[in-house]
């Protein structure tokens, strides 16, 4: 299943202002000089973020960047409070990070609901100011203003499994074969400029697989696509290293990949991982067998280009993912 990924978006948020308190007096037949009965204003609506586990992207927010909660109603006569403003609830997928306009992290949303902006407080009606010395107060307060904030939402938990490899290792082709997604595939470096996402299911378990943009030496220092890829690999549960077996030194490529991951975040090296050798169609059987015998961490050799049956790869990924 193909999933178009939106993983970063800017939002303009405003909570509601509180309603004003009311100035009014009781006016009923046969009752002279009725006392104050102005009600309080309602509180402004809140901006709330809700983690929705059914979402896996920020696509639903692409065309709505401005979110404004409702204002509280003004207080009314007969001590009636104004209604509170309507809250705005923004659904986001797990792993969404909220940052300010300068990129500083504010919230890391994993589960539940969070009130991000409180609404303004409703003003007090004149009934609150009645006293023994002031039986007919003509004073009420205004509601306080809502809050405004510009934020950047960034999705860092985009998948259960991340495909990691150098440019043109065949990750996009493998993702297409495993999940039926349709990433852009070409013979030039950095074909994948943004993570592609697909869903793999064995009929019982469903996992999300991301094709992460290719790593080069120095990626952990920001070279190439640098941090734009590394941020996405932080929370995947499992890493699948995809290495071009036809390259001059596949083992050195694996060491570079591990080095760049570890330099960015040492915890990445503690994640479950498997190593797959791709592009066996470009070498002879003798070289393939030699690599299998000397590269102990290699789990499987295959060609995602010519092998239409990816059952062995699916089995390896599913088994490793399900292991505790």
Image (cartoon, rainbow, N blue to C red):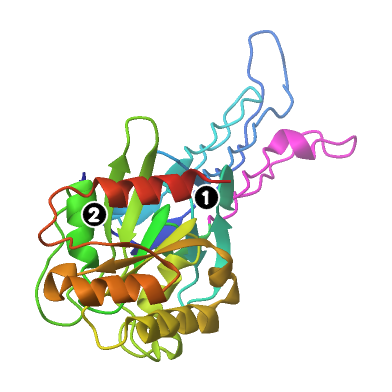
Q: Is residue 57 visible?
A: no
Q: Which residues are magenta?
A: 120-146
Q: Residue at x 30, y 52 (%)?
A: 313
Q: Which residue is mark 1?
A: 17
Residue 63 circle label: 2
* Residue 178 x/y as whole percent: 23, 50
Q: Residue at x 18, y 52 (%)?
A: 177
Find numbered disc 1 in the image and state the secondary structure of the residue it sits on.
loop
- Eyeballing the image, is 213 above or below 313? below
Quadrant (top left/top right/bottom left/bottom right) for the N terminus: top left
In this orientation, which residue lies closer to the viewer: 263 or 290? Answer: 290
In this orientation, which residue lies closer to the viewer: 125 or 109? Answer: 109
- In the rendered image, residue 321 lying in the magenta stretch gets the answer no
Left or right: residue 80 versus residue 307 is right
Q: Residue at x 13, y 75 (%)?
A: 282
**Would you say the residues marked 2 and 1 are in contact, meaning their CB atoms lie under 8 Å apart?**
no
In this orientation, which residue lies closer to the viewer: 294 or 256? Answer: 294
In this orientation, which residue lies closer to the viewer: 308 or 197? Answer: 308
Left or right: residue 254 versus residue 120 is left
- In the rendered image, residue 132 lying in the magenta stretch gets the answer yes
Label 1: few (<14), some (14–19) or many (≥20) C-alpha neighbours in 10 Å: many
Q: What is the CA distance from the residue labelled 2 to the residue labelled 1?
A: 25 Å
Question: Which one is in front in this view, the residue at disc 2 or the one at disc 1?
Answer: 2
């Amino acid at each position: 299943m193909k999933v178009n990924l939106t993983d970063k978006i800017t939002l303009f948020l405003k909570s509601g202002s509180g309603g004003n308190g009311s100035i009014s007096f009781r006016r009923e037949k046969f009752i002279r000089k009725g006392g104050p009965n102005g009600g309080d204003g309602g509180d402004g609506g809140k901006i709330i973020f809700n983690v929705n586990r059914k979402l896996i992207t920020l696509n639903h927010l692409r065309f709505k960047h401005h979110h404004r909660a409702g204002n509280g109603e003004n207080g009314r006569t007969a001590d009636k409070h104004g209604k509170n403003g309507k809250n705005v609830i923004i659904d986001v997928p797990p792993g969404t990070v909220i940052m300010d306009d300068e990129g500083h992290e504010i919230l890391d949303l994993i589960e539940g609901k969070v009130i991000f902006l409180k609404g303004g407080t409703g003003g007090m009606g004149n009934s609150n100011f009645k006293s023994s010395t002031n039986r007919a107060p003509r004073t009420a307060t205004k509601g306080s203003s809502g809050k405004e904030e510009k934020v950047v939402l960034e999705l860092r938990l985009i998948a259960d499994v991340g495909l990691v490899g150098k440019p043109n290792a065949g990750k996009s082709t493998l993702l297409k074969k495993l999940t039926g997604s349709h990433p852009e595939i070409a013979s030039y470096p950095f074909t994948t400029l943004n993570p592609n996402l697909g869903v793999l299911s064995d009929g019982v378990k469903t996992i999300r697989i991301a094709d992460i943009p290719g790593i080069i030496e120095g990626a952990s220092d920001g070279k190439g696509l640098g941090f734009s890829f590394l941020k996405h690999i932080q929370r995947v549960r499992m890493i699948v290293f995809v290495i071009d077996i036809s390259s001059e030194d596949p083992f050195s490529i694996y060491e570079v990949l591990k080095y760049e991951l570890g330099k960015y975040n040492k915890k990445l090296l503690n994640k479950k991982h498997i190593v797959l050798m791709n592009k066996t169609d470009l070498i002879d059987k003798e070289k393939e067998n030699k690599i299998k015998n000397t590269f102990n961490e290699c789990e499987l050799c295959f060609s995602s280009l010519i092998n239409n049956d990816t059952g062995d790869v699916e089995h390896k990924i599913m088994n490793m993912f399900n292991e505790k």
